[in-house]
Image (tube, grey):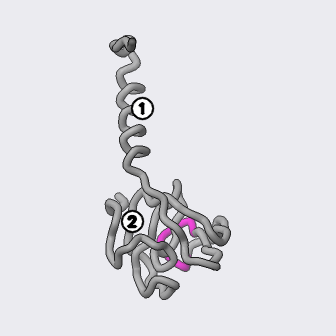
């Protein structure tokens, strides 16, 4: 048997944040990067941004949002779409198997 509890006084914001986080996590999908490819992760949506790490071959990534940036030609074609895979981390969509030539996630704000 489960018991529904009302949030404790002062915890409404915490409860709302947890609900929002759970909703985002439930809708999150992981996408494979191009086979036999190591992908540079950059600090912004373009090749002029600093490389912050490199994804190993066979990696899968979440895409939180997408934004236009430098045009890149990669395994999956030519695109200017960049995928936000973590806070301050972007990879070119040209190396991500999203099954689409366009946007599959919301635009980054």
Q: Are marks 2 and 1 in contact (CB under 8 Å)?
A: no
Q: Where residue 54 sits in the image (x, y, percent)?
A: 66, 69
Q: Nearer the viewer, residue 1 or 95?
A: 1
Q: In the rendered structure, which segment of residues is drawn in magenta?
A: 42-48
The relative height of residue 7 versus residue 86 in the rendered view (above or below) is above
Mark 2 neighbour density, 10 Å: few (under 14) some (14–19) many (20 or more): many
Q: CA distance from mark 2 to mark 1?
A: 23 Å
Q: Where residue 18 sits in the image (x, y, percent)?
A: 42, 32
Q: Give the residue displayed 60% in from the left and 65% down from the top.
A: 59
Q: Which residue is mark 1?
A: 18
- Locate the C terminus by quadrant: bottom left
Q: Specify whether residue 43 is painted magenta.
A: yes
In terms of image quadrants, where is residue 25?
top left
Q: Residue furthest front?
A: 1
Q: Which residue is mark 2?
A: 66
Q: Nearer the viewer, residue 99 or 65?
A: 99
In terms of image quadrants, where is residue 17?
top left
Task: Decide if residue 24 is on the left or right side of residue 73.
Answer: left
Q: Where residue 55 sits in the image (x, y, percent)?
A: 64, 68
Q: Give the residue displayed 35% in from the left and 30% down from the top.
A: 16
Sooner in the amino-acid sequence: mark 2 or mark 1: 1
Q: Give the residue displayed 37% in from the left and 60% down from the top.
A: 108
Q: Where residue 104 sits in the image (x, y, percent)?
A: 34, 66
Name the chief secondary structure element in magenta. Answer: loop
- Locate the N terminus by quadrant: top left
Tag 1, which secondary structure? helix
Q: Specify whether residue 12 is painted magenta.
A: no
């Amino acid at each position: 048997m489960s018991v529904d509890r009302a949030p404790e006084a002062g915890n409404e914001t915490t409860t709302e944040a947890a609900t929002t986080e759970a909703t985002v996590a439930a809708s999150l999908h992981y996408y494979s990067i191009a086979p036999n490819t190591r992908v540079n992760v950059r600090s912004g949506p373009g090749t002029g941004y600093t490389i912050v790490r490199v994804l190993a071959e066979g990696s899968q990534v979440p895409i939180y949002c997408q934004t236009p940036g430098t045009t890149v030609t990669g395994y999956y074609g030519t695109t200017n779409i960049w995928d936000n895979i973590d806070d301050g981390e972007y990879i070119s969509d040209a190396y991500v198997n999203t099954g689409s030539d366009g946007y599959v996630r919301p635009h980054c704000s």
